[in-house]
Image (cartoon, helix red, strand yellow):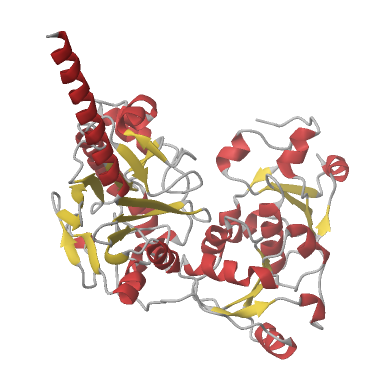
Amino acid sequence: MMLNKVNLTTVFLLFAMLLTQENKLYAQSYFFERVYDETLAQASYVIGDANTKEAIVIDPQRDMDVYLEIAKKNNLKITKVAETHIHADFLSGSRELVAVTDATLLLSDEGGTDWQYEFPHTGLKDGSIIKVGQVELKVMHTPGHTPESITFLVSDTKAPATTQRAITGDFIFVGDVGRPDLLEKAAGQIGSPEVGAKQLYNSIQKFSQLPDDLEIWAGHGAGSFCGKSLSTIPNSTLKDEKLTNQAFHFKNDEKGFVKYILDGQPTPPKYFAVMKHLNKVNRPLLIQVPILPKLNQTTFQKAIDNNLLIIDTRNKAEAAKGHIPNSLHIENSKTLSTWIGSLVDYQQQLVLITEEKDTEDLTRKLMRIGMDNIYGFVTDLDKMTVPLEKSELVSIEELKKHLDKKNVQIIDVRTADEYNNGHIRGAENIVLTSLENSLDKIDKDKSVIVYCQSGVRAAMATSILNRNGFKNIKTYSGGINEWTEKKNELVK
């Protein structure tokens, strides 16, 4: 009898091992890759079946060649393209990707008549099922951030015991949830924040009933304006979010949740309204990254004569040494597209000053927000016979000498929250994004010193003021970072 028990145990263990191996085999055939654009803190997903070679792309960026490369590398064919909602923070590449691959476009038909995509697509409703080989994506309507917002619950039909994934878009983030105030601030839907907040509350309660080990893969990470406290961690679990995400801690308290979620949301960039519109309506497609011309002396001078907007994307120190008069300085960084989208009119034709190596990078960053009206690049400014201006910089010692002087106006162009957390004595707060609409607050008869956190926004602000006729402008490039490092006191 003892031998039989041992044999039975051995057989059971072997069977369990085989079952585990089988599940691992199936799991390996379930392709999953997150594509992350650091410039907009935006995530998209490629999900496929290694057996049938089918794949779906969710929330693709506009320069969609990255997905074609992933498909080619992994021997996949993109047969479906989907979105979690009508995006406000980037120009979706769904239609570009469909145009190239002839894939089926799958979009939400939830949210009511005001929130329907206005171009051909296959509609999705709550409970809709999408098949990608053995992979199944079940649609869950999760309104709140937007009325049409949907979440995709991803599972492996041949290995049902494996953990499910949720592609949540802007519904659930790691450490945060989507903001319901964007429809009012970006799309002009007056009175929608409270309605959206209540919808979001109900969506969270419904979502909370799913298994605790559900993996959450969101549409954004830290740096996005689609929430107020997004994490840098790429994914989480429902269990972890229930424990650490404050938005999950309002069970049976809808009123408390509404107050919490609407309080302290950052002001969204101006371009969000443009994205919300372009992602909903028919628009021209751009199915490859354009190669823009390099301007010579003649074409550059013509651009200056015709008052094209010249944006100097070089680093602030280099631009300060010599820049085109009336140019706008926006340093090339991860946040360049957000700043250009916040400060530049989409109807304005642009010339970009940069280095040769950065031209494609800049083109991609701008096409992701639909800023396509680019006349060309200047990559050799030193060879252009155009007079340059210098920016006047002040050191920390010079700034200290100007404190409390009646003929000096010190301007802090950081956000209101940053300013309230500590600023230089006597400084006035004029947020960079509202600077051009607040020129009446600046005294042309005084010497003006501008600062920010590290000098990047201050350089932008100085160029804006110069473009608007303010000439007695100085920039404190060290900013609050240097001020506090040198043990100087902040006023709160």
The answer, for residue 277, to whether it is visible in the render is yes
**Which residue is farthest top?**
2
Residue at 23% over, 39% down: 203
Q: Quadrant of the C terminus?
A: top right
In the depicted view, which residue is nearer to us: 249 or 98? 98
Say left or right for 357 vs 149: right
The answer, for residue 82, to whether it is visible in the render is no
**Which residue is farthest bottom?**
298
Say left or right for 283 vs 159: right
- Vertical placement of 68 versus 38: above or below? below
Q: How many marks?
A: 0
* Image x and y of residue 257, in percent: 31, 31
- Vertical placement of 27 versus 470: above or below? above
* Image x and y of residue 293, in percent: 61, 83
Residue at 30% over, 47% down: 167
- Vertical placement of 340 versus 382: above or below? above
- Vertical placement of 210 versus 50: above or below? above
Q: Quadrant of the N terminus?
A: top left
* Image x and y of residue 128, in percent: 14, 53
> Hey, which quadrant is residue 360 in on the image?
bottom right
Residue at 61% over, 33% down: 421
* Image x and y of residue 482, in percent: 77, 40
> Hey, which quadrant is residue 193 in on the image?
top left
In the depicted view, which residue is nearer to us: 275 or 40? 40
